[in-house]
Image: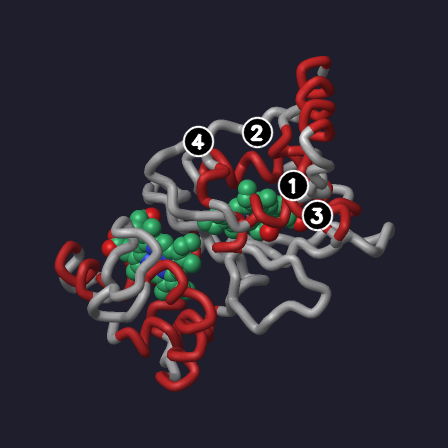
Amino acid sequence: MRAALAAALILLGCGGTQTVPAATLGERQFSNAALSTSPFNAFSCSTCHQVAKSPAARNDPGFNLYDVVHRQTWWGGYETTLLDAINYCMTEFMGGRALAADSDNARELYEYLAANSADPSAPALPLTVVKNVTGLTNLTGDTAHGKDVYDRSCRRCHGDPHTGNGRLTSKASIIPEDTQRVFPGIARQVAVEKVRHGKFFNIGGIMPLYPAESISDQEIADVITYLGF
Ligand code: HEC
Ligand code: HEC
């Protein structure tokens, strides 16, 4: 604390350097993959979440975090503090060390989210993890709508279908080819499973799961049909 104060006084002494508000720093951190301590991580919070009063039409796996600080619980009731909810993402998806409650990063993220939380009675959001995906594999999909879903959702990480051009990280599979090569005959099933379960249910990897609230069964059928699974 004393060191921070001394540093601040020195800065002031050198010609009135403006302090950037914590919420502004937090907004930057929200889109900064280097917030994670893992050198292999390419995800930022904004890869999977929006923070917007009027969110863009995206199928993000993670919910819109507008009003998030006022919710009573997070992750469908599994997390009872906001920091734990954030740190679950940090450790499971971004491969980083959990943010300490008294760290600058945690405080700045909090200030940013608080600045975007207008409704003090905002309810906790339901989270439906779809366990059984067998029926979904046989749904007929609509290619045109599937392209739309892909562009609004999967493209950010996977880049162009078939080539992976523009993908966020070389860890993101080239779909559908990588999957068809590794899982001949069951690639469609694997894709469905991947979207619904992500890395969980012993599947592994770093892809997030998509709860029912984030993408419908029909939209999954549409997107995997568009991809040629
Ligand atoms: C790879 C995707 C991914 C990344 C990266 C990610 N999250 Fe999440 N996050 C999710 C998913 C999926 C959920 C579960 C659905 C939900 O509750 O929003 C979730 C849940 C949450 C929740 C609980 C929201 C609620 O009301 O239930 C918070 C808060 C949160 N994330 C914050 C963050 C922050 C802050 C970061 C960056 C440090 C981050 N997340 C990074 C995917 C991600
Ligand atoms: C946040 C980034 C991200 C998003 C968004 C995302 N994926 Fe992925 N996906 C990955 C990564 C990284 C991998 C490879 C590592 C792993 O398996 O987790 C992957 C793997 C896959 C695989 C390969 C499974 C296998 O083992 O061959 C499929 C299929 C897939 N994703 C489909 C999709 C579809 C369809 C969407 C959109 C609905 C989507 N992904 C959205 C990051 C993402």
Quarter of the figure with the N terminus = top right
Q: How many marks?
A: 4
Locate residue 144, reporting x and y percent.
39, 86
Q: Which circle marks residue 99 in the picture?
A: 2
> As shown in the figure, which amino acid type bears the numbered disc 4?
Thr
Q: Is residue 185 above or below residue 114?
A: below
Q: Is residue 72 left or right of residue 151?
A: right
Image quarter of the C terminus: bottom left
Is ligand 1 less than 8 Å from the beta carbon at label 1? yes
Residue assigned mark 1? 109
Disc 1 and disc 2 in contact, CB within 8 angstroms: yes
Q: Which residue is denoted by mark 3 in the rendering?
A: 113
Residue at (67, 47) in percent of width and height: 24
Q: Secondary structure at mark 1?
A: helix
The quadrant in which residue 34 appears is: top left
Tell me the residue that label 4 is attached to. 37
Residue appearing at x 29%, y 70% in the figure? 160
